[in-house]
Image: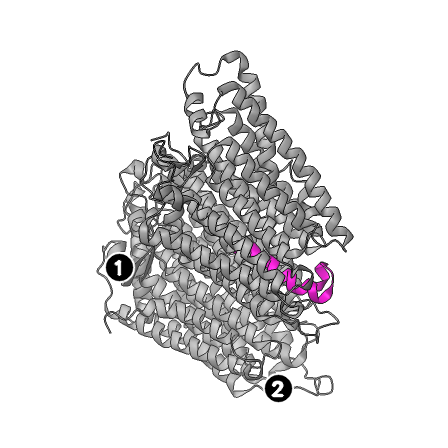
Amino acid sequence: MENFPFLSVITLLPIFMAAVILLLPEERKENARMLGLAATLTGLILAAYVYVAYYQNLPAEGASWRETLLFVEEYNWVPGIGINYIAAVDGLSATLVLLTAIVGVGGVLISWGIEDRPREFFAFFMLLVAGVQGVFIAVDGFMLFFFYELAVLPMYVLIVIWGWERTREYAAMKLTLYLLIGSFIALVPFLVLYFNMPALGQESTFDLRVWAETDFPRNLQLWTFLPVFLGFGVLAGLWPFHNWSPDGHVAAPTAVSMIHAGVLMKLGAYASMRVGIQLIPEGAVYWLPLIILFTVVNVIYGSLIAMRQRDMKYLIGYSSVSHMGLVTMGFAAMNMNGFTGAGIQMVSHGVMTALFFAVVGMIYDRAHTRDMDALSGMGTVLPAAMVAFTIGGLVSMGMPGLSGFIAEFPIFLGVWSGGTLNLSETILNLNPANYYPILAIITVFGIIITAAYILRAIGTVFLGDYDGEKWHDMRPLLSIDYLTLAAFVLILIVIGVFPEVIAPIVQSGVRPVVGRLDEVQQAGTVLNSVQSSAIDILNWLGGAS
Amino acid sequence: MNPQSLLPSVPEFLAILPEISLVILIVAVLAYDRILKPAERRRVGLLAAWGSIVILLITVGLWVLFREPEPNRSLVESLMWGGMIRNDLITLIFRVMFLVAVAIVSLISLDVPALQRGEYFALLLSATIGFSLMAAGSDMIMLFLAIETASISLYILTGFLTDDRRSTEAGIKYFVYGAFASAIMLYGLSLVYGITAQTNIYVIASLVAQSGAIPPEINGLFLLATVMIVAGFGFKISAVPFHFWTPDAYEGAPAPVTAFVSTASKAAGFAVTIRVFAAGALGAPNFDSEWWAMLVAITIVTMTLGNILAIFQSNIKRMLAYSSIAQAGYTLIGLVALTPDGSGAAMFYLLMYVFTNVAAFGVVVLVSRETGSDDMQDFYGLSRRAPYLALAMLFALLSLGGIPPTAGFIGKFFIFKAAVDAGLWWLALIGVLNAFIGLYYYLSVVKYMYLYRSDDEEERIPVSRAASVALALSVLGIIYLGIAAGPAFEWTRQAGAAFFPFSG
């Protein structure tokens, strides 16, 4: 059991299964979904094991990143230039691997009824899952890029073939080009960093553990950070590069929207944190006080646009942009609270959005419209969908007792207390102490706007009069739908009520990153009173962890 | 050759063993063609394919079992036959590319009725001899003869379908352009000979490197010679502005021939180009040389123009022609990086490009045989008509576009990495931006195949066993090089060092 390659199996099994599915003979193509379910379920079981096992072996506080990595597997890939296959997880990636596995199973279940070329659909879906998992387990820079690109391509095919007829061609091409341009913009400075290693007395390698222990020269960090962070930030929906995201969400078939908003956008946030902030900390400290302004726009602007939408999928698409803004904002807070909140927000938002898209997909399958003006009284026929959507909505408003609160509260705390950091030499000589608290206050209004559009959506779609004649062919939910929704809702509630199932492991994952930032900050890491009281409150809410 | 003995030594003999075997194979193919009954005509193609696979195995076997060509040989030891050819790892790797290409192309073409003739396969093989000697040649005379051997075979192959007006037209066009380019190149070579009184490129390179060997007053003449040689080489690799023949020849030629021209011929052109320039025969290989600036300009224009023009094509062969121009641009980045790693990356890129483009054209051959045209519309709904063909095309297009898990991703990665390593990060950036333009039209074809519907969806496209073997081999090559790039990359990297015998 010790040497079982859990992570490689989680990542590579779907690829293997994709090949098997493609080779299925024509007359047995219905088996594709069973094989897909088998692969994702196996992945889920293994991911759950990895999560639990990691949780039981949480690294000590102050451990270096290298020490926090568990389940390490190392093989040579292209040894001559320092490319290796290194798979490992820390607290954050273990969590995200589990999230991906959950959403993956949900995606397969939701697409159970797909009839147009099921073999190809499930094969590409498997590739998508594999690409995402691969990024989360990658500890080698090249491997990270490899899987990152691998995740983007199936998106194109899945959207263009099985997406919404009206916009799929446009949206798929837009999405693919945005994301690939982003990743390649990140690639060039990444290579520049790589070639600077010999000058620093390191052997040139893509092993990120070595990178994390290398202090690159300050001026190099300053100019490489921005393209790396923004390049990956495109996938995280960072304003002003978010434009692909709502279009992509809307055009994608339900399962793909779930993976896309639920997991894929986290990929961007994760990679910009892992490669950007963790490896280029001085650059991060220099630029993040500016980037946080973008994230505020993200949150406010995203939710304002969501207010205007009549199409449910666009509504959720823009709300995703808004919520992902909170994740990057947590990073930009540059302290433990912010990062913890951002980590939890990734999970909470992932599950919540997957839930939203699942509900919308169920409604669309039955009503053949997503126009909120045309829908009314859906709660009468689909009560479970209404309950699930409402819980998801409460999560996105940050209602205490649900996961959204556990995620958003620390982020706001982090930004608020980010003002106590005493930074020097940031871009434009911005001093976070002067304006971070104000930004926190502004951003909180985003939640109010969120409440407005979510409540309005619930009101128009689920409540109101039910027109029995118009919807005469309405079918009730299938048991498989109930199962999916119940699982997602359960996760949101469990995280909300027992944050200790996730908070410590995420904290252990982000601690080394924050440690890197603290090293380059002049002010040190002594908790100030606001921060410590915040942690007290958090502990109290979570029932003492 | 040892002056005391008239017999060649064993290494000298081994150095041209592949060429000797190819000549034997040509004779065998022509003879076999005479004795075949009309109903068994496809067997001549099988003989050519299997024969070239056997030669491939011999070539690789010599390397694996006897370390021949020995990589640690000094420059003087690796020059053979009086300095006419150089037998080194570069030669070996390029030979592998050519033999793979000719084997797969033979497999693809053996079920095309118009091409089931002994002459066709004999010409393919004689072109391969030319390529092989181009890759090995280290003397200007040898290089010119090899280039002509290859080119003349290709002119005939391009116009092979005498009943098809487009094919003959393409053949004539290719021939006129090619003869013109050859003449200019030959003039350039003769000027270099006039200046240095030497024909061996390595001797020339060491002369050029000496200060004062070329009097300053004839520097201009030397530069003129360089420009002429660049024009000749640029024609072979279809670099802008010497690319005008490419779309027409690619479109008119029989599709298997196009596959061959776009891969093996291009790779051979690169072998010569990289060898001559990296050796420093036309000026030291550093960023101050005039030819370097010239090549960088050509690199940038080639990628950009190739990609932009490819977007507007409605004929799949023309699109792939412009795409191959763009791909030549990426490969040139590896050359102008002027490092062993860069040249190695260029070789790796060509290796993966051979597999990729042969797969792409293989699909085009099969589809156009069924539909009778090369319109992009033939690809509408291909995934319903022939799911496996569509899948092979998907992999080829992804590889051209540079998306994992295909070899194109790793190939581009190595090229850009080499460029950044050499300090040319801006060139890498231009390459990256170009890769996106490329992605647009490659993905469009994916869209046609998987999304669009056509009226003939019910008609399956028949795929012969030979063709499916050929496609499976090339797709496996694409995936293998994409996932387990390590060994092949180490190999090309090691070979890349041989391009620069005078540095380090």
Q: Which amino acid does label 2 sit on?
A: Val
- Compared to residue B408, the image places residue B16 above or below, namely above
Decide whether the magenta segment is chiefly helix, strand or loop: helix
Q: Which stretch appears magenta? A: B355-378
Q: Which residue is drawn at 44% across and 34% down?
A: B338
Q: Quadrant of residue B377?
A: bottom right
Q: Where is residue A440 in the image (x, y as percent from the top left)?
A: 45, 53
Q: Quadrant of residue A451?
A: bottom right
Same-subunit check for callouts 2 and 1: yes
**Residue at numbered disc 1:** A68
Left/right of residue B93 with respect to residue A58 in the rendered view: right
Q: Please report, as a chain letter, where disc 2 is located.
A: A
**Residue at numbered disc 2:** A381
Q: Please report, as a chain letter, where disc 1 is located.
A: A
How many marks can you see?
2
Image quarter of the C terminus of chain B: top left
The question of residue B359 being in magenta is answered with yes
